[in-house]
Amino acid sequence: SQQGEEDPQALSIQEGENATMNCSYKTSINNLQWYRQNSGRGLVHLILIRSNEREKHSGRLRVTLDTSKKSSSLLITASRAADTASYFCATAARDTGFQKLVFGTGTRLLVSP
Amino acid sequence: DAGITQSPRHKVTETGTPVTLRCHQTENHRYMYWYRQDPGHGLRLIHYSYGVKDTDKGEVSDGYSVSRSKTEDFLLTLESATSSQTSVYFCAISGGGASTDTQYFGPGTRLTVL
C-alpha cells in the first residue's frame, strides 16, 4: 500500500505562478524525499528532508515537513513551462523498517506559457 | 542519468517466456533497486540489492528474481512473463550510507507482455 499520498492529483497553472503540492503519510519516517519525472523519463531527485528538519530550500523549491501532521509540502515558486512534470514524494518509513523508500502516486503539474 | 543504463529500453514478449532486464552503473554505488511503474500505483519496489550477492524483496516481488554478481550489474528476471507484468521498469542506485538515501534513476525499460 502507498505510504505517501500526494494532493492534488493534478494541478494546472500559468507561468510565473507558484505551485504547491502536498504529501501525507501514515507512519513515522526518518526522511521524506521529492522527485520529479518528465514524461517518458526516469525520476530525478529534488530534495531530501530528514525527520528532524522542518524546512529546506533548493533554488525555487521549498519543502516543509510537519511530523505531527504527517505531511509535507513542495512549493515551486515562479513556475516555468519546463516545470511541467509529475512530482512524487517518497518516504523511508517505520513500516518498512526504514529500509525501503515507498513512493506516492504523484501530482501531475502542467505549467502553461 | 547519473551513470546508469538499462537494457533493453523496449521489449515486447509473449506470455510464458523468460525475460531478463539489465541495469548497469558506472558509479560504484552500493545499493541498486528495481521498481515498476504503473498508472495509478506510482513506483513500487520489486527487489533491491545492498551489495554483491546481497538482495532483498520489495513490495511486489512475486514472479520476479534478481541477481547481482558484480557491483555494476543488477539483473531482473521474469521467469515466465505474464500480461500483468506489462509495465515500465526502472532501475535506481544509491551510494549513501543507507538504502533510503537519495536514489538516482535510469531511463526505464518499457516491457509489453502479449
Image (cartoon, grey):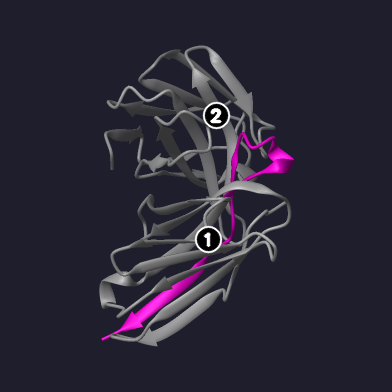
- Is residue A101 placed above or below A49 in the rendered structure? above
Query: Residue, x 51% and y 69% (percent of image)?
Result: A107
Amino acid marked by disc 1: Arg
Question: Residue A112 at x, y = what percent?
Answer: 31, 85
| Disc number for residue A54 | 1
> On the picture, is A63 further left or further right than A66?
left
Image: magenta residue range: A91-113
Q: Nearer the viewer, mark 2 or mark 1?
A: 1
User: How many angstroms separate mark 2 from mark 1 (CA)?
Assistant: 30 Å
Question: Residue A42 at x, y = what percent?
Answer: 38, 50
- Is residue B21 placed above or below B82 in the rendered structure? above
> On the picture, is B18 further left or further right than A77?
right
Query: Residue, x 39% and y 78% (percent of image)?
Result: A110
Q: Chain of mark 2?
A: B
Q: Chain of mark 1?
A: A
Question: Residue B26 at x, y = what percent?
Answer: 27, 25
> For numbered disc 1, what is the local secondary structure?
loop
* Residue of label 2: B48
> On the picture, is A93 further left or further right than B6?
right
Query: Residue, x 69% and y 35% (percent of image)?
Result: A97
> For numbered disc 2, what is the local secondary structure?
strand
